[in-house]
Image (tube, helix red, strand yellow):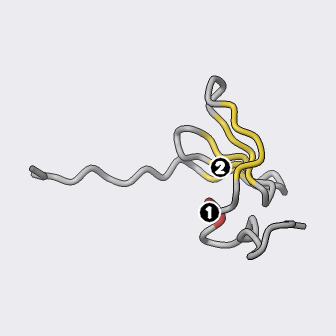
Amino acid sequence: MCPHDPACPAAEAPDREAARTLACHPEQGWSLLCNGVVLFEDTGELLPGGTAIAPHRPDPLVGAA
């Protein structure tokens, strides 16, 4: 359970990446969020129940100046 006020989004919530970081290991490419989600540098995620979320980087803008 999240001790923050307001509480961090749940691991199942669409905005789960907005949870606070509990542990950050940039040298290994991952961070542990308050809601139990492991967030990887490539934007992939591992949810507390073991579900893997594939990287979801935004598509580059074509013809952007």
Quarter location, residue 49: bottom right
> What amino acid does circle 2 point to?
Glu
Quarter occupied by residue 19: bottom right
Residue located farthest toward the bottom when viewing the structure as drawn: 6
In what element is the residue under mark 1? helix
Report the label total.
2
Between residues 5 and 58, which one lies in front from this camera angle? Answer: 5
Q: Which residue is mark 1?
A: 18
Mark 2: give few (<14), some (14-19) or many (20+) Cα within 10 Å: many
Residue depicted at 81% across the width and 51% down the height: 50
Of callouts 1 and 2, which one flags the residue occurring earlier in the amino acid sequence?
1
Quadrant into which the N terminus falls: bottom right
Q: Please give the residue where the numbered disc 2 appears in the rendered image.
A: 45
Determine crowd level at label 1: few under 14, some 14-19, many 20+ residues with C-alpha closer than 10 A.
some
Identified at 63% across, 53% down, the residue is 53
Could you say whether the residue bearing mark 2 is in a helix, strand or loop?
A: strand
Q: Residue at x 10, y 51 (%)?
A: 63
Please give left or right for residue 62 compared with residue 18 in the image. left
Q: Position of residue 33 (x, y in %)?
A: 73, 52
Q: Nearer the viewer, residue 30 or 55?
A: 30
Q: Indicate which label's residue lies in the foreground, 1 or 2.
A: 1
Q: Quadrant of residue 32?
A: top right
- How far is disc 1 from disc 2 in space, using C-alphas? 13 Å
Indicate the position of residue 65 as horizontal and vertical percent values: 9, 50
Q: Are marks 1 and 2 in contact (CB under 8 Å)?
A: no
- Report x, y in % for residue 6: 74, 76
Name the amino acid type tagged 1: Ala
Tell me what residue is drawn at x 77 percent, y 47 percent. 22
